[in-house]
Amino acid sequence: MHVKKERVEIIMNNFYFFKDKNDEYRNNILNIQAGREGLFNTIFDLINTNLNEGDTVLDIGNGGIIRCNYKKLHRLICADLFINENVANKYLYIENVSFETANILDLNKFEDNSFDTVIACGVLHHIAGKSKNKTKENVITALLECNRKIKPNGKILIVEDMVYKWFEMFEIIFYPIIQTICKTLGFGYIYQYSLQSFSRLLEYCKLKTDIIPIRPGEYGWFMNLKIPIVLMPSRPFFFIVRKK
Ligand SMILES: C[S@@+](CC[C@H](N)C(=O)[O-])C[C@H]1O[C@@H](n2cnc3c(N)ncnc32)[C@H](O)[C@@H]1O
């Protein structure tokens, strides 16, 4: 009963923004990250070079955005709380790509040790909870769930914006107020970690990780606004996490 309530809560947390506005969000992101030197290509290259020919890959929190060359893979499962039907229909006849609903906090529907790689791009800041402790607990659960699903020599590839330390202090001090505002504006609970505290969570989970700063694009995306990157309190990072 308790698990069921938690599942409903995490779905509802993202429902308004990603269920109803998925296409709009997708277009905005692709627009902001466009260009030869843009963030989309940078992330695509980083993810792609870490995938091997014939790999079986789970992209959790896919949001209808495929960030790798699926053609070289044995299988790519694009999983999310919600499926973008428009995108899924485009891949209907591509045999090695499928779209499925799944929750990063409970990946029981997939076999343990079955993926060469799990990709989690831009999803961890969306699994925040009402309290800071709940948020931390959710991220730890998500990391351990992904770890459980990768093969012994598998990897989790994480892409996340990390906020500066001073901004995280602000997030912590004003946690209830910020979350109430986010919820009221329809974004759901959101929490962005600093590199220092996210690294501590990875250590807590005993996950060995390579951390690579990503060259940011010209603009960032914050509270549904396109913001020049110099004004953003965060920078993107790429994490290559090994199975523990
Ligand atoms: C910022 S978008 C990232 C989309 C895409 N991965 C990308 O690279 O741009 C976050 C996505 O995570 C999904 N999401 C949020 N919470 C989730 C959860 N608990 N389990 C799975 N997906 C989740 C949302 O529905 C949304 O599609």
Image (tube, helix red, strand yellow):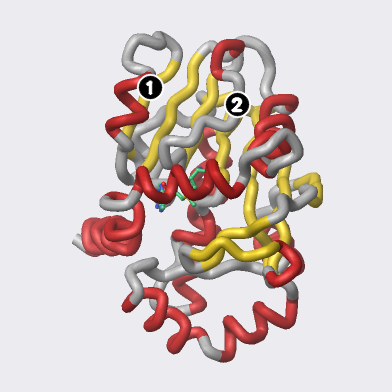
Is residue 211 something that shows in the picture?
Answer: no
Mark sitting on residue 181 = none
- Say which of marks 2 and 1 sits in front: 2
Is 235 on the left or on the right of 179, as rendered?
right
- Residue at 71 percent of width and 62 percent of height: 229
Q: Quadrant of the C terminus?
A: top right
Is 89 on the left or on the right of 72, as rendered?
left
Tell me the kind of residue under disc 2. Cys
Q: Earlier in the sequence, mark 2 or mark 1?
A: 2
Q: Would you name the residue on which mark 2 appears? A: 68
Is residue 201 something that shows in the picture?
Answer: yes
Judging depth in this view, the residue of 224 and 4 nearest the camera is 224
- Residue at 55 percent of width and 50 percent of height: 122
Q: Are marks 2 and 1 in contact (CB under 8 Å)?
A: no
Residue 25 rendering spot, x and y as whole percentages: 42, 50
Quarter of the figure with residue 6:
bottom left
- Residue at 68 percent of width and 37 percent of height: 35
**Can you tell me whether the CB of the residue at mark 1 lies under 8 Å from the nearest atom of ligand 1?**
no
The correct choice, above or below, for 103 with respect to 198 in the image is: above
Judging depth in this view, the residue of 193 and 187 nearest the camera is 187
Residue 76 rendering spot, x and y as whole percentages: 48, 22
Is 7 on the left or on the right of 218, as rendered?
left
- Residue at 32 percent of width and 37 percent of height: 84
- Alpha carbon of mark 2 to alpha carbon of mark 1: how far? 14 Å
Q: Quadrant of the N terminus?
A: bottom left
Tell me the kind of residue under disc 1. Ser
Q: Would you name the residue on which mark 1 appears? A: 98
Per the image, label 2 sits on a secondary structure element best described as: loop
Residue 135 rendering spot, x and y as whole percentages: 49, 69
Judging depth in this view, the residue of 241 and 70 nearest the camera is 70
**Can you tell me whether the CB of the residue at mark 2 lies under 8 Å from the nearest atom of ligand 1?**
no
Using a 10 Å C-alpha cutoff, classify the residue at mark 2 as few (fewer than 14 neighbours), some (14 to 19) or many (20 or more): many
